[in-house]
Image (spheres, rainbow, N blue to C red):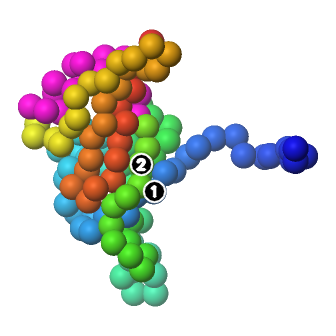
């Protein structure tokens, strides 16, 4: 056992995905998934970098879409929540999003997995 240390962290504010093309990623998350663009800010000595954030409407947590740092894009994963997994699954499939079948099992929430164009994984989980 290790001793726990109290934290001053109170919220998960930003998760980060690496993407090959920030503009294409913005289009996927806003046009296909229906999320909001929360920020697109240039930074660096000559404005050569961008900090881009998207989020589902009403969410306090955001997803940053960053260029890869020394590697390939993709490979990250997050979970998002919905009160109606089947309706969201049907909507995304109709929009051409790469979605897996809905999964259900005893002791586990109803969910499905999907991927963005860069291979980042999103679990869409049913919540009451």
Report x, y in % for residue 116: 25, 50
Residue 16 badge = 1
Residue shown at 59%/43% (left/top)? 12
Q: 20 or 108: which is nearer to us?
A: 108
Residue 13 vs residue 107, the one in the foreground = 107
Q: Dominant secondary structure of the magenta stretch?
A: helix
Q: Quadrant of residue 82?
A: top left
**Residue 77 image label:** 2
Along the viewing direction, whichever of 46 and 55 lies nearer the viewer: 55
Q: Position of residue 22 (x, y in %)?
A: 27, 64
Name the secondary structure under disc 2. strand
Residue at (31, 43) in percent of width and height:
36
Question: In the picture provided, is 80 more to the left or to the right than 1?
Answer: left
CA–CA distance in space, label 1 to label 2? 9 Å
| Residue 127 shows in the view | no
Label 1 Cα neighbours within 10 Å, binned few <14 / some 14-19 / many ≥20? some
Residue 69 pos. (x, y %): 43, 76
Label for residue 80? none
In the displayed structure, 79 sits above or below 105; it is below
Residue occupying image coordinates x 35% and y 18% = 104
Residue 40, magenta (yes or no): no
Could you say where residue 74 lies in the image, as x and y percent from the top left?
A: 34, 61
Name the image quarter holding the N terminus.
Answer: top right
User: Which of the marked residues, 1 or 2, is nearer the chain's N terminus?
Assistant: 1
Q: Is residue 90 magenta?
A: yes
Q: Is residue 50 shown left or right of residue 95?
A: right
* Secondary structure of the residue carrying numbered label 1: strand
> Which stretch appears magenta?
80-94
Contact, CB < 8 Å: mark 1 with mark 2? Answer: no
- Can see residue 18? yes
Q: Residue at x 38, y 76 (%)?
A: 71
Q: Residues within 10 Å of mark 2 (few under 14, many from 20)?
A: some
């Amino acid at each position: 056992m290790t001793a726990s240390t109290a934290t001053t962290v109170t919220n998960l504010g930003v998760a980060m995905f690496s993407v090959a093309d920030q503009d294409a990623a913005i289009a996927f998350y806003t046009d296909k998934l229906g999320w909001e663009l929360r920020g697109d800010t240039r930074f660096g000595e000559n404005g050569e970098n961008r900090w881009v954030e998207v989020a589902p409407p009403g969410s306090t947590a955001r997803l940053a879409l960053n260029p890869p740092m020394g590697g390939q894009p993709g490979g990250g994963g997050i979970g998002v929540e919905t009160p109606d997994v089947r309706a969201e699954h049907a909507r995304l499939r109709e929009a051409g999003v790469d979605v897996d079948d809905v999964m259900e099992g005893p002791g586990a929430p109803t969910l499905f997995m999907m991927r963005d164009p860069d291979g980042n994984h999103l679990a869409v989980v049913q919540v009451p």
